[in-house]
């Protein structure tokens, strides 16, 4: 298999974890109400931990060597401001899609980075693709619940939407492989912009929703999500 074909396969597999997570959210059936409620909050926290691991272990560390202090800081803050503006716009329109935005902001830059890494012959691309898939699964689960409760879309339409969005992975991966590999500074700026936006979303939306009164288990999901990212990072280095 040629390198560009491998990029397509890996990024598509990682992207398909999004509709898979949405499908699991649709079919989940736990007969004990309090356990189902705690599980949902735990998965929200798990997704937040996985996103934090992407920021702390992949997006930021891989970007800093290519940028100066002012550029790096500006891109990071700009990402947070952009997501704040998006959050305000969604709130005014009566639609909540912050977890969906965070999921795509994580997935697309990592797919770009994976494609660029393959162009440079990096041996860690397989593990990066696996980490992306493991992040997208709980994020797809959480985003499905968010959209299902705040929009009139049917379950079938939402899963179809997530399936369509999965193809952004191959597009971004090929873009990184064919065009962005010679421009590491541009890739780094995109990744830091996404990192700032993700960090805003985690503290604005995911962390508050993960809390459940008189239950102490859900926050452990954030620890497990970050631990998952930590394992992937240690395997990559």
Image (spheres, rainbow, N blue to C red):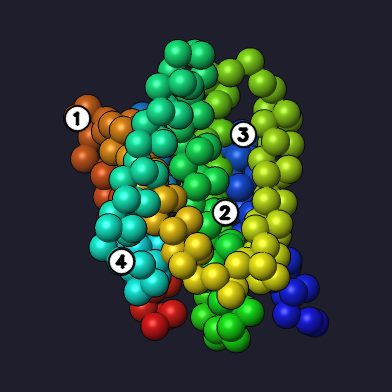
Using the image as rendered, state which of residue 230 and residue 60 is in the foreground: 60
Q: Which residue is mark 4?
A: 68
| Mark 4 neighbour class, 10 Å CA radius: few under 14, some 14 to 19, many 20 or more | few
Q: Secondary structure at mark 1?
A: loop
Q: Secondary structure at mark 4?
A: loop
Using the image as rendered, state which of residue 66 and residue 130 is in the foreground: 66
Nearer-N-terminus badge (4/1): 4
Nearer-N-terminus badge (2/3): 3
Q: Secondary structure at mark 2?
A: helix
Does residue 96 lie above or below 123 as drawn?
Answer: above
Task: Give the spatial CA distance, label 1 vs label 3.
Answer: 26 Å
Q: Which residue is mark 3?
A: 26
In percent of width and height, residue 134 lies at 51, 59
Residue found at x 40% / y 22%: 88
Q: Is residue 134 visible?
A: no
| Mark 2 neighbour class, 10 Å CA radius: few under 14, some 14 to 19, many 20 or more | many
Q: Which residue is mark 2?
A: 108
Q: Which residue is mark 1?
A: 214
In percent of width and height, residue 48 lies at 36, 46
Task: Please give left or right for residue 204 compared with residue 7 in the image.
Answer: left
Q: Quadrant of the N terminus?
A: bottom right
Mark 4 or mark 3, which is nearer to you? Answer: 4
Nearer-N-terminus badge (2/1): 2
Mark 2 or mark 3, which is nearer to you? Answer: 2
Q: Do the CB atoms of the residues marked 4 and 1 lie less than 8 Å apart?
A: no
Q: Do the CB atoms of the residues marked 2 and 4 lie less than 8 Å apart?
A: no
Task: Please give left or right for residue 84 compared with residue 73 in the image.
Answer: right
In percent of width and height, residue 146 lies at 50, 28
Mark 2 or mark 1, which is nearer to you? Answer: 2
Q: Is residue 152 visible?
A: yes
Task: Give the spatial CA distance, label 2 vs label 4.
Answer: 23 Å
Residue found at x 60% / y 67%: 180
């Amino acid at each position: 298999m040629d390198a560009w074909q491998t990029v397509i396969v890996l990024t598509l597999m990682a992207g398909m974890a999004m509709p898979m997570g949405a499908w699991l959210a649709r079919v989940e059936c736990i007969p004990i109400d309090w356990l189902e409620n705690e599980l949902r909050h735990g998965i929200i926290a798990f997704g937040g931990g996985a996103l934090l691991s992407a920021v702390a272990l992949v997006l930021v560390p891989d970007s800093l060597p290519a940028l100066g202090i002012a550029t790096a800081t500006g891109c990071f803050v700009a990402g947070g401001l952009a997501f704040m503006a998006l959050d305000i716009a969604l709130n005014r329109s009566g639609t909540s899609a912050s977890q969906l935005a965070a999921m795509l902001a994580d997935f697309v830059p990592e797919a770009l980075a994976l494609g660029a890494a393959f162009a440079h012959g990096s041996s860690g691309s397989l593990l990066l693709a696996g980490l992306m898939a493991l992040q997208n699964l709980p994020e797809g689960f959480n985003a499905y619940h968010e959209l299902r409760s705040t929009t009139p879309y049917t379950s079938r339409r939402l899963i179809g939407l997530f399936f369509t969005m999965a193809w952004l992975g191959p597009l971004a991966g090929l873009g990184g492989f064919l065009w962005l590999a010679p421009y590491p500074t541009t890739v780094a700026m995109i990744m830091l912009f996404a990192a700032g936006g993700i960090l805003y979303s985690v503290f604005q939306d995911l962390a508050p929703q993960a809390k459940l009164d008189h239950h102490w288990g859900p926050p452990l999901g954030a620890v497990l999500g970050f631990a998952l990212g930590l394992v992937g990072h240690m395997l990559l280095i």
